Amino acid sequence: MNRQRHTSSLRKTLSVAAVALFAGSSVLPSHAQTEVAPAPSVTQAGPASVADLAEGLLDAVVNISTSQNVKGTEGPDSVPAPQAPEGSPFQDFFDEFFKDRQGEGGGQRQVQSLGSGFIIDAAQGIVVTNNHVIADADEIEVNFADGSKLKAELVGTDSKTDIAVLKVDPSLKKLKQVNFGDSDKMRIGDWVMAIGNPFGLGGSVTVGIVSARNRDIDAGPYDDFIQTDAAINRGNSGGPLFNMYGEVVGINTAIISPSGGSIGIGFSIPSELAVGVVDQLREFGETRRGWLGVRIQPVTEEIAESLGLKLAQGALVSGIIKGGPVDNGSIEVGDVIIKFDGKDIRQSRELPLAVAESPVGKEVDVLVIRKGEEKTVKVTLGRLEEGEKLAASEDAAEEDGGPVATASVLGMTIGELTDEARSKFGIQQDVSGVVITEVAPDSIAAERGVIAGDVITEIAQESVSVPKDVVDRISALKEQGRKNALLMLASKTGELRFVTIRMD
């Protein structure tokens, strides 16, 4: 019994001492002070300070503020005012509340947002940030560490990598720039520093390490994020992630958090990917990516076995885009692409990134496995931005260019609301729009509770009546850089509800 008491006391003493060393303080909890031995004369040194490094970079990091004028009834939070029972005293409250939120008579209201950015060319006034920070903005303002502000114009955006380039007038203010570093040299465990505007608190510095690399978080077609435990919160989006040489190795863009605050899992666009996008946006105002013209899917263990492959790797060609670069038979459906222009393709998601980083018009060697044998074919790349129009046309329209009777969008099969469809799903005559005839079980639409027989009446508050309207509206939203589509759905009995579906 005495031995147990002594052990418990010793553990308590060591635990409190450890807290004191970690906190760098000699002050201990009052109830434990009598149990602690005198503090050592030499204190343990913490990690080296990053104060000098941060001081030299703060002036090149900016806050981005935007404003957007929208109609009072516009936005994902705009829903019809609820109707209380007739004569209810709550109806006046509902009417007043929703009138205040949506504006008098559907008038204009201003929506503001905050983000971060950084200057990469002081002479030209070039600022880099995230596309989602400035998407749909009517006005963009760059706020500097000394409190000054400059209006910014939009140079170009890329929704696929979530990058935007802005320009301010360098003659109005002396600017300081930072340079891109090589993200490929970053190793797991390397120290990094983030500077940004979390929750509107400008000039905030946080430090952490590279937690992982090559992360795919289903944010876009070119996911290849650096993961870091440096604190990144709302408002940090678009800000730089620095290495310990003061070079930008990433653009902070996303976090995983159940609460909305940092839990030590943040993601940055690697500089290796960002540099090429920024250069193209500066030169052309848009991206010009290579395009192979194939539809692909992952090679699973089952597929590998069925094809007689030794390893489940590469990208399986599941379709050829008509009119695309390989519509000449050079690549066939069923081919497995294992190498592109000298780069090994281990996972299917690596192929789109490798192709997109290649120049338009370049002739490349593509190594495929066809019927169990390796074969190298030469392909001249097209341009992705033009190829997407061909792919969308192939998906949405008949070959003769006639009206679209059915289409597949966002995991849903849609069709015209004919008398036959009304009878099949029991849809009332006063319901109008585009009927959903099928929902993929593993789609976002299914997760949102969308079912066959629901009717799409509006998309982003614009009415739709035929499948082509839906296809065109979704395409327009994607071109605007939107990541989500707001659908108004009617049940078979006419009850309305809003559903937001991510457009990946």
Image: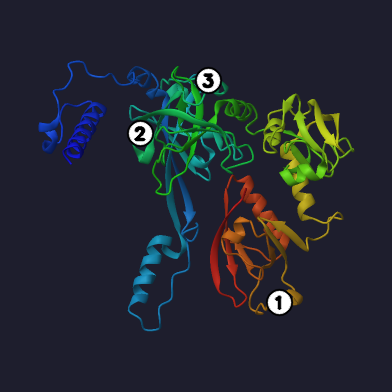
Residues at marks 3 and 1, CA–CA distance in whole angstroms = 60 Å
Residue type (three-letter) at the residue carrying disc 3: Gly
Say which quarter of the image contains residue 145.
top left
Task: Name the residue: 86% across, 54% down.
Answer: 399
In terms of depth relative to the viewer, which is nearer, 109 or 287? 287
What residue is pinned by disc 2? 202
Q: Quadrant of residue 272?
A: top right
- The image quadrant where one finds the N terminus is top left
**Mark 1 vs 2, N-terminal side:** 2
Compared to 37, does 397 lie above or below? below
Task: Identify the residue position indicated by label 1 in the image.
Answer: 422
- Report whether residue 382 is seen: yes
Q: Is residue 146 left or right of residue 427?
A: left
| Helix, strand or loop status at disc 1 | helix
Q: Secondary structure at mark 3?
A: loop
Expressed as whole percent of the image width and height from the top left, the position of residue 114 reads 42, 41
- Residue 248, given in percent of the width and then of the height, sits at 49, 23
Query: Which residue ends up furthest to the bottom in the rendered image?
Result: 87
Q: Is residue 422 placed above or below 480 in the rendered structure?
A: below
Who is closer to the viewer here, 36 or 206?
36
First in sequence, mark 3 or 1: give its number.
Answer: 3
Label 3, on which residue? 181
Crowd rating for badge 1 (residues with CA inside 10 Å; few <14, some 14–19, many 20+): some
The correct choice, above or below, for 437 with respect to 379 in the image is: below
Residue 228 at x, y = what percent?
46, 32
Question: Mark 1 or mark 2: which is in front?
Answer: 1
Residue at screen point 56% across, 38% down: 162
Rounded to the nearest angstrom, the CA distance separating label 3 from label 2 is: 23 Å
